[in-house]
Image (cartoon, rainbow, N blue to C red):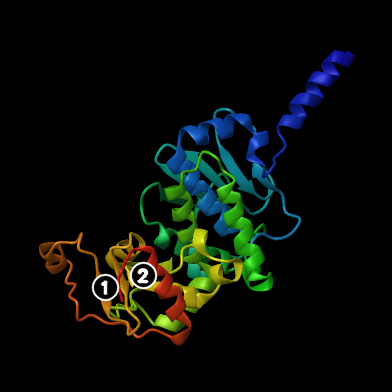
Amino acid sequence: MSDTKRLDLSKLKKTKRTPDLYQREAARKWLEANPKVYKLVLEIIDFCDQYRVEGIEFGWFNRESSHVFKYGKDSVGSRLSIRCKQIGCTITVTLPQSENIPKSIQNLFVEEDNELKHRILFEADLDNQSKYDELLKIIKTNVIAPLSSHDKFEEEEPEEYINEFINTIYRLSKTTDTEKDALVKVRIGQGRYRAALDDIWKGCALTGIKCRDLLRASHIKAWRDAEAHERIDPFNGLLLAAHLDALFDKGLISFDSNGFILISDLISESDLNKLSIDKSMQLEMPPETHEYMKCHREKYGFEC
């Protein structure tokens, strides 16, 4: 009888959730074997954690056949789950039927098993910005009890909040430097830091393109090279169209002290023409950005 009780208690304990993935061996092993999905789910959890209500249940389930991170109670009330699959992650937002859903999001939900559900598929290796916008649209209405539209990122010290996230990423031994840099890029592309870059640059710093979905945020002086205060300084950020951002990140372009574009010899004239890039292009650089840009030029060997 006592052995049976101990066995039951052990099984019961395993059903509990924890945010610590290393206490959920099956899920951890699966994610480490699928690094692209691992990177994506960390990105989604970080996004949701900006809005998580204190004291709410959240964490990984200890199930071998289903790798799920959930906010809220298991089968009661409003909740959000993140289910990991080979192609990416599916977010399911579940609301009680009695929930008063604002008109702005009513069309998103369908009735299933006497509840209302909405699913969003985030695919690995794709730009999921529109999916985040869709999720935020729901969060802002305050209908998901585990999450609130009140942005904790605005409350906390930004340096503390951002450093905590990035340090967690850098502790993941199986995450490559390239993947870590990609996660840093995701973080600065959201929240208050991105809003500050929007205010400074008003669109792509070089072309003036204003469509937010076409723009990418980057650090000028890279995260790994920067001091703590430089990492959260908006003037160490640059907003560029996606193709220009890729070139800047790889050190194939930079900018001189007057804001004129500097172009690496590794880019052919033919490619420059196809990208509509020429040496007369210039951005208007805030004085506070000059030292950061100097570091970028020096790092990638541009003579000025």
Instruction: Give the quarter of the figure containing the N terminus.
Output: top right
Q: x, y (%) of residue 277?
A: 19, 72
* Res. 262 mark: 1
In this figure, which residue is indicated by the disc labeled 2? 297
Type of amino acid at the residue the image marks with label 1: Leu
- In the image, residue 92 above or below residue 298: above
Q: How far is mark 1 from mark 2, CA to CA?
A: 9 Å
| Mark 1–mark 2 CB contact (< 8 Å) | yes
Mark 2 is surrounded, within 10 Å at the Cα level, by few (under 14), some (14 to 19) or many (20 or more) other residues, namely: many
Give whichever of 253, 137 is nearer the camera: 253
Instruction: Give the quarter of the figure containing the C terminus.
Output: bottom left
Residue located 35% across and 68% down the image: 213
- Would residue 281 be found to the left or right of residue 219 on screen? left
- First-in-chain label (1 vs 2): 1
Q: x, y (%) of residue 165?
A: 60, 56
- In the image, residue 67 above or below residue 252: above
Disc 1 element: strand
Q: x, y (%) of residue 93?
A: 55, 53
Disc 2 element: helix
- Would residue 128 be found to the left or right of residue 243 on screen? right
